[in-house]
Amino acid sequence: MPDNNKYKIAFVGNTAWSMFNFRLGIIKELKQQGHDVVVIAPKDTFTAKIVSEGVSFMHIPISSYGTNVIEEAKTLAKFIRIYRKEKFDLIFHYTIKPNIYGTIAAAIARTPSIIITTGLGRLLSFKNSIAGVFTLNLYRVAGRLAKEVWFLNNDDKSVFLFKKIATENKMRLIKGEGINTDWYKPNGYVKKENDIKFLFAGRVIWDKGVGQFVEAAKKIKEKYKNVEFQILGFIDPNNPNAISYSQIVKWQNEGVIRYLGEATDVRPYLERCDCLIFPSFYREGMSRILMEAAAMERPIITTDNVGCREVVDDGINGFLVEKNNVQDLILKISDFIQMGNEQKKEMGKAGRIKINKSFREKQIFPVYLNTIEKYAKE
């Protein structure tokens, strides 16, 4: 047991990218308070960024889309070996496979752990398949073994209750993972009077509404000549719902969209756009890009969908559209185009006010700190 309430804490996810971009704030806060923090995830281009912050990193291979039983068993065994060797005081798990395998491994290693559900996209997409039933049953085991199960929205909590993955006394609802509003802040960008840029930013997969974004762009560009539709994001060929490189090239060659590639820092792209469009019908936890855009005073058009609607007050800091409804999306884009510049500016300001009120990362820190004090002493 560490002295002076200083503990060895692990943060475990399926990518180093997500650990750096979504959880760096709380990780740095814990380090500043003297805790020994270790990030465990598959190596990627963000591993070096994590290490450069003075945070220990341990690689564990996780196949996000793999279903080979032998390989999955090997992954569980690696979790067990790491946890037994490192003897953490508390472990925070994120995303499906770390939540399941990591929680089971933590129980075997007699280490308390927390499950954080960052969205149920792939879990619900399995539906009644063999893989889905198997995953659901494993999740129920993990739900019993974890000390607490956290949710970023109430809809996901309701699903876990309905499917009996965890009991309500273990559940906790937090408002996203928080945004650093000192990092994501308005820059005073002055738009060109007759030039309107709409940005989609996120993983380039069908579930995020990219197809709807493109279809709406085609119709809008027939009527308005001073608009540009941009796509920024990672194309993952391993994702079964990925949009192919060839499809992106086709859309770009047709003049429908402009593909901006990938970026490690989304802020310059948000600064140069007039409105973020995110027509996702994926089972979001709490959309990060929506919080980032709102914090930077960018109006938002997004779906009335889990993990999206929580960030937008319809007509105040953006517009909500019906899922998979291209006509509704076209209507809301047209409404935005016809708004005056001052009205657009006020809509952006309302977004930052909302983020500062409900989604600042410093509001999330006490949840982690209290949880550490509660369970790391066991």
Image (spheres, rainbow, N blue to C red):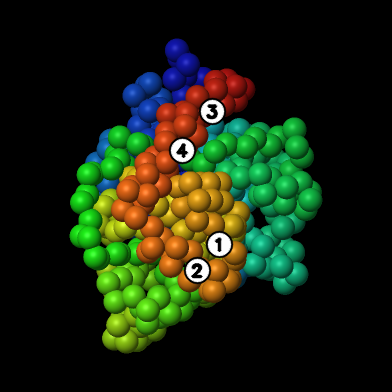
* Percent x, y of residue 1: 51, 20
Mark 1 lies on residue: 321
Q: How many discs appear? A: 4
Q: Is residue 225 something one can see in this rendering?
A: yes
Q: Amino acid at mark 4?
A: Lys
Q: Residue furthest top?
A: 4
Instruction: Report the mark closest to the observer, 1 or 3.
Output: 1
User: Residue at horizontal 46%, vertical 52%?
Assistant: 318
Q: Quadrant of residue 53?
A: top left
Mark 2 lies on residue: 331
Q: Secondary structure at mark 4?
A: helix
Q: Decide: marks 1, 3 in contact (CB < 8 A)?
A: no
* Percent x, y of residue 160: 72, 49
User: Counting residues from the N terminus, which is met first, the one under dot 4 or under dot 3?
Assistant: 4
* Percent x, y of residue 212: 49, 74
User: Counting residues from the N terminus, which is met first, the one under dot 3 or under dot 2?
Assistant: 2
Q: Is residue 347 above or below residue 1?
A: below
Mark 4 lies on residue: 354
Left or right relative to 215: residue 293: left
Instruction: Report the mark closest to the observer, 3 or 2.
Output: 2
Q: Amino acid at mark 1?
A: Val
Q: Is residue 79 something one can see in this rendering?
A: no
